Image (cartoon, helix red, strand yellow):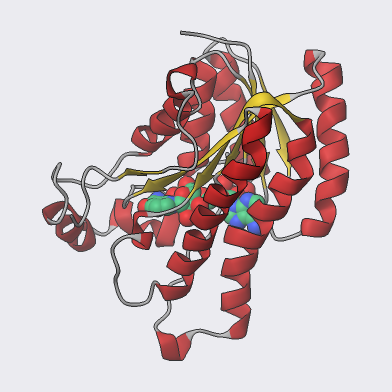
């Protein structure tokens, strides 16, 4: 099924964000691809979408710079109007995030703040800035992690920053419901991207250990997360809101 909705995916210069952008575009959405440092990667994502017959544009957005969000929202509205003749965004995917993994004694205020600012504070204020531009019946998808369900040493602050994102998804579902906007969290398990220094893609020992603890017997591929995000944004999932949906192949059950 195709549609002509407009989706915005944060951190779509690579990894899961790129996969989500491609998955949404395959289903017919026009996509705003945001990036922080990876301008080239974002251009590649746009090109991949265009090569497949879709339409996309790249815009810079730093999730840790909440003061820039009002200007970004204005710039976005102008881009939607001039490029696609639209005043509304239909799908917001809060995908961009960082992983810093320290045991208790090693957590610094600087690294704590970086995690919370990028993974929680940024997405919250981006939702606040973009909800006025979201269409009635729009969707917000927040990318969390399976680490909010299972635990391992060195993940406390990262997991807590994502748990906060999950909780705000549930609370905002009630506030946004009257406008028909549904908001959900997708919680990926270990997936082969640049994340965590590329460990889930490049470290055979870690990959083997994670595969052994996963029902489907391997780590995830980026498209398996991107397609789940795109499916959740579809009309087929129109009655789903305030949920946390894990996409992990059955990791650490
Ligand atoms: N891979 C996994 O195993 C896994 C598992 C569970 C959850 N997740 C979550 O999934 C999301 C995507 O992860 P990934 O695996 O695709 O990671 P990745 O390959 O490291 O990509 C991270 C993306 O986030 C963007 N980003 C980082 N900091 C940003 C900031 N301050 N402002 C704006 N964009 C920023 C990056 O943009 P630039 O390249 O432009 O800098 C990049 O596009 C993250 O939220 C992560 O926590 C990943």
Q: Most extreme residue toward the bottom, as rendered? A: 105
Camera sees residue 155: yes
Q: Residue at x 62, y 26 (%)?
A: 46
Q: In the picture shown, does residue 75 fall above or below 90?
A: below
Q: Quadrant of residue 252?
A: bottom left
**Residue 217, quarter of picture:** top left
In front of the other: 23 or 169: 169
Q: Give the percent coordinates (x, y) of residue 68.
A: 83, 53
State the residue at coordinates (82%, 21%). 87
Task: Using the image, determine if residue 223 lies above or below residue 72.
Answer: above
Which residue corresponds to the image point at 68% horizontal and 50% vertical from the top-left? 36
Question: Where is residue 66 shown, x and y percent of the image?
Answer: 77, 57
Image check: 147 left or right of 180?
left
Residue 63 visible in rendering: no
In percent of width and height, residue 201 lies at 31, 51
Q: Is residue 51 left or right of residue 225?
A: right
Q: Nearer the viewer, residue 195 or 234?
A: 234
In the rendered picture of this protein, how many numbered marks are placed on residues?
Answer: 0
Q: Is residue 99 left or right of residue 73?
A: left
The quadrant in which the C terminus is found is bottom left
Which residue corresponds to the image point at 50% horizontal and 84% vertical from the top-left?
A: 107
Q: Is residue 156 above or below residue 107?
A: above
Quarter where residue 108 is shown: bottom right
């Amino acid at each position: 099924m195709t549609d002509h909705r407009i989706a915005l995916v944060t951190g779509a210069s690579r990894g899961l964000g790129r996969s989500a952008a491609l998955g949404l575009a395959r289903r017919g959405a026009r996509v705003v691809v945001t990036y922080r440092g990876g301008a080239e990667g974002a251009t590649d994502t746009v090109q991949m979408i265009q090569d497949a017959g879709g339409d996309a544009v790249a815009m810079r957005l730093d999730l840790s710079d909440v003061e820039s969000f009002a200007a970004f929202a204005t710039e976005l509205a102008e881009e939607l109007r001039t490029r696609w003749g639209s005043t509304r965004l239909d799908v917001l995917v809060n995908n961009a995030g960082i992983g810093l993994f320290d045991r208790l004694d090693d957590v610094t205020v600087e690294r704590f703040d970086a995690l919370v600012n990028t993974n929680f504070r940024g997405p919250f204020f981006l939702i606040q800035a973009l909800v006025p531009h979201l269409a009635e019946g729009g969707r917000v998808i927040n990318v969390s992690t399976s680490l909010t369900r299972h635990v391992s040493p060195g993940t406390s602050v990262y997991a807590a920053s994502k748990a906060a994102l999950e909780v705000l998804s549930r609370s905002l579902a009630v506030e946004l419901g009257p406008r028909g906007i549904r908001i959900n969290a997708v919680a990926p398990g270990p997936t082969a991207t640049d994340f965590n220094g590329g460990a889930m893609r490049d470290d055979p020992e870690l990959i083997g250990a994670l595969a052994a603890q996963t029902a489907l017997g391997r780590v995830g591929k980026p498209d398996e997360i991107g397609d789940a995000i795109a499916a959740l944004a579809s009309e087929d999932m129109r009655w789903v809101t305030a949920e946390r949906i894990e996409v992990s192949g059955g990791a650490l059950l």
